[in-house]
Image (cartoon, helix red, strand yellow):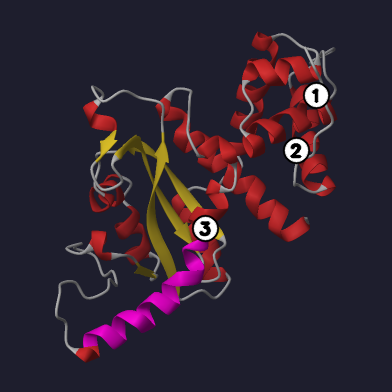
Amino acid sequence: MLFYRAAVDLSRPTLNYVAGIIRRHRKAISSVWRRLNTAQQALLILIYLRKGETYNELASGFGVSVATAWRYVEETVALLRARAPKLDRALRNAARDGLHYLVLDGMLIPIDRVRADGPYYSAKHRMHGMNIQVIASPDGTIIWTSGSLPGSTHDLTAARIWAVLRALAQAGMLPLADKGYQGAEDPVATPYKGRNKPLSQKAANRSYARLRGPGERANAQLKGWRILRKLRCCPHKAGQLCKAIAVLQNYELTHG
């Protein structure tokens, strides 16, 4: 086997942040000895999430077994997603920060599935995947991410399942959504739909797109972590991975 030096485009404070979480966890469970120290385990999970390397590649690179690499990843993802805020708390934090509207968008995480797995097939994206609902601030900061649902789930249906629109209405937040959310019972702003619209509606849609545009960067930030470009693990881990990555992404933006 050949080895080479590589880099991961994340900052040292993010590595220290993850290592600190692992260190406190090990102390809490009285873990006496591990094959890798906390900094090495933190680096392993960052490489897994950011670069999407397989367990075999991680095991070879860090000199551990595949089973150990898997355990480290599972443990650290659970620690990170536990720090992701619940929906109500996330919206309270947004209101405290003085935000008057938020951007609601759906995202499809591609998965490794065959055509026979019908519930996972998204006709809109023409691929198999898992539906994730994302709430972002007007500047694109990730506020909250949902759990995962099969890719065939419509965005509006997913928002209803996770009670997103109701929580936004109770928090007094106006969600800016795309055309897929038209027909929602709770107040939600969507662009005008249909062809041959009058000039006034076209102008309104352009202004609406300028408001939503920066907020839509949240999905692009999540997709910047290569593990989400195509999952080859259990599809239902998509939501857990998104929550863990959202915690890391926000920390990287504020401290990196």
Q: Which residue is mark 3?
A: 218
Sequence-first tag of 2 and 1: 2
Residue 68 image-quadrant placement: top right
Sequence-first tag of 1 and 3: 1
Left or right, 75 with reference to 182: right
Label placed on residue 121: none
Residue at position x 70%, y 52% from top? 251
Above or below residue 196? Residue 166 is above
Residue that sits furthest to the front in the current view: 2
SS of the residue under disc 3: helix
Q: Is residue 35 visible?
A: yes
Crowd band around label 1 with a 10 angstrom C-alpha radius: few (<14), some (14–19), many (20+): few
Q: Which residue is mark 1?
A: 27
Which quarter of the figure is the C terminus placed in? bottom right
Left or right, 99 with reference to 249: left
Crowd band around label 2 with a 10 angstrom C-alpha radius: few (<14), some (14–19), many (20+): many
Is mark 2 in CB contact (under 8 Å) with mark 1? Answer: no
Q: Position of residue 169 (x, y in %)?
A: 33, 66
Q: CA distance from mark 2 to mark 1?
A: 14 Å
Q: Which residue is mark 2?
A: 18
**Is 201 or 103 nearer to us in this picture?**
201
Q: CA distance from mark 1 to mark 3?
A: 34 Å
Which quarter of the figure is the N terminus placed in? top right
Q: Position of residue 84 (x, y in %)?
A: 57, 45
Q: Is residue 82 visible?
A: no
Q: Amino acid at mark 3?
A: Ala
Residue at position x 44%, y 77% from top? 211
Asked whether 211 falls inside the magenta stretch, the response is yes
Q: Which residues are magenta?
A: 201-217
Q: Position of residue 233 (x, y in %)?
A: 48, 23
**Is 158 or 185 nearer to us in this picture?**
158
Q: Position of residue 57 (x, y in %)?
A: 69, 20
